[in-house]
Image (tube, rainbow, N blue to C red):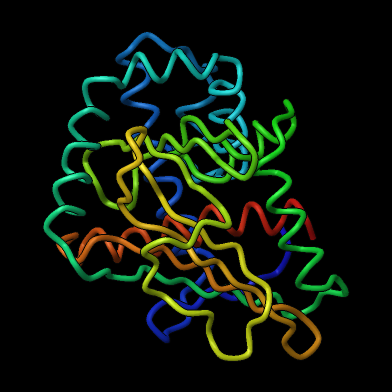
Amino acid sequence: MTPMIFVIDGQQVSKERIDVWEINRIDHEYRFLTKKGFHFSYEFPQLLARHDVAGARQEMAAMKAAQSPDTFRQLLLPKYTLGNAASHMAALFSRQRRFSVTDIIIPQSERTPTEVMTAINDIMLINTAAHRKINLATNPDHFVLQETAKNVQEVFEITGGSPLPTHFFAHYGDEEGLQSQLSKGFHVQAAGTARLADGTIIGGVRHQIKKEAAGLHFRALVEFPALVPNTMIRQHQYHLACEFRGWLDAVL
């Protein structure tokens, strides 16, 4: 994997801590999916036991990619109905937003910020079999990530430390209601609203990247309703570190 430095709340976080977060989430999804009748290889428990993050990640992604998106929509319908209701209520009663932010430093890269952001956007917003597997592999809490209209991405995931999945649509280029600003020194961004299927805005994103020394500085930023608890904001910082190290590694 491309060498990266992770910074959360101004403190450097080791790759190993991100690995532990990821393997724990893979194990969580493995236990849930096996109870629902999905099958993994006989070796998969050993991958988890020896913390083989790369091996477990790829098998989990391959298993999910072998299913249709409708499989997960139907499987998790009761749970994401509750999750969406909670998101709707939090947005309704929150005038302010809270930001979950993770910084990722790539010490060495000849690629430009525009090239990197464009390549990540292509993976997120151009539906191919290869892109689907990358999107599923970047985070074990991803179930569906695909384009449904121009610059609109369907997202079906477990967000941060939430006990429930959420099903929403990221509308890139639509900044309605966003409260974050482009950070000083950053000039390339992917910003947009997060909306439920009925159009209710439940948050948004403002991901940013800039050239820094001989490499790059990527800032992943997600806006949540102010009522979302600290634990979820904190857990989502690790969620962001996990998924964006995957997307960045895929394009660098």
Between 44 and 142, the one lying in front of the other is 142
x and y percentages locating residue 54 in the rendered image = 61, 43
Task: Please tell me in which quadrant of the rendered image residue 211 appears.
Answer: bottom right
Q: Which of the pair 210/48 is nearer the observer?
A: 210
Q: How many marks?
A: 0
Which of the 4 image quarters holds residue 132? Answer: top right
Residue displayed at 33% across by 52% down: 160
Identity of the residue drawn at 54% across and 17% down: 41
The quadrant of the picture occupied by the N terminus is bottom right
Would residue 193 be found to the left or right of residue 55 on screen?
left
**The furthest residue to the right:** 110
The residue lying toward the viewer, choosing from 14 and 199, is 199
Residue pictured at 37% horizontal, 31% vertical: 29
Name the side, left or right, on which 130 lies relative to 236: right
Question: In this rendering, would 42 be left or right of 116?
Answer: left
Residue pushed farthest top? Answer: 37
Relative to 208, 70 lies left or right: left
Q: Quadrant of the C terminus?
A: bottom right
Q: Is residue 181 positioned above or below 15 on the image? A: below
Can you give x and y, in whole percent of width and height, for residue 186 in the image?
A: 63, 83
**Residue 154 percent coordinates (x, y):** 50, 35
Query: Residue 201, how many percent across, how many down?
Result: 33, 50
User: Residue drawn at (70%, 53%), measured in percent from left and top?
Assistant: 120
- Work out whether residue 124 or residue 194 is closer to the camera in this orientation and state it: 194
